[in-house]
Amino acid sequence: MSNVEAESEAPHDVRAALKRGLRCKCPNCGEGAVFDGYLKVRSECAVCGLDFTPQRADDGPAYVVILVVGHLCGFTLPVVFEQMRDNPLIVACLLSVAAIILSLIMLPPVKAMFVAFQWAKGMHGFGRAGRPAVTPETRCAEGC
């Protein structure tokens, strides 16, 4: 097995990939953007050339966001309702707006983290036979 094959089969750091995904950056290099728009995943990273086409985030990010936002609003409801007992319509409107805003803010980073996790674990065609991971040495060798 050649050095390039051994390097491409080395496990990727899941924690680092998820941190990069949280910032909506490429899980491989941490510099290129994952999205071409609000939620449209690019076909490849503009910096390192990592192919994003194998990603299959589908409905997973939406389920996670609904789970988190639903729990936050659900636990907040009794507290807010106790404070504003006279105005249940205001409570409903306030929590609805908060849920929508939280969902819109959380969805891109959660989807990018799904893509990063799939890449780090070699799922769906992000297999190890592709391009090797970018390290500080290879990044500088390509032209710092």
Image (tube, rainbow, N blue to C red):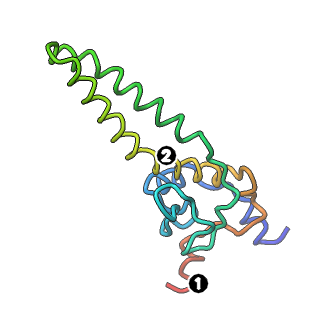
Mark 2 lies on a secondary structure that is helix
Mark found first going from the N terminus, 1 or 2: 2
Of all residues, the one furthest to the right in this rendering is 1
Quadrant location of residue 53? bottom right
Q: Nearer the viewer, residue 80 or 91?
A: 91
Percent x, y of residue 43: 63, 66
Residue type beneath disc 2 = Val
Q: CA distance from mark 1 to mark 2?
A: 31 Å
- The residue beneath circle 2 is 110
Q: Tell me if 135 is positioned left or right of 102 in this view.
A: right
For residue 125, the mark is none
Q: Tell me if 35 is positioned left or right of 59 in this view.
A: left
For residue 142, the mark is 1
Density class for disc 2 (Cα within 10 Å; few <14, some 14-19, many ≥20) is: many
Residue type beneath disc 1 = Glu
Percent x, y of residue 106: 41, 44
Say if 75 sits above or below 113 in the image: above
Please report the residue visible at 62 percent of the width from the left and 69 percent of the height from the top: 44
Q: Tell me if 88 is positioned left or right of 14 in this view.
A: left
Percent x, y of residue 1: 85, 67
Percent x, y of residue 124: 74, 51
Mark 1 lies on a secondary structure that is loop
Density class for disc 1 (Cα within 10 Å; few <14, some 14-19, many ≥20) is: few
Quadrant location of residue 98? top left
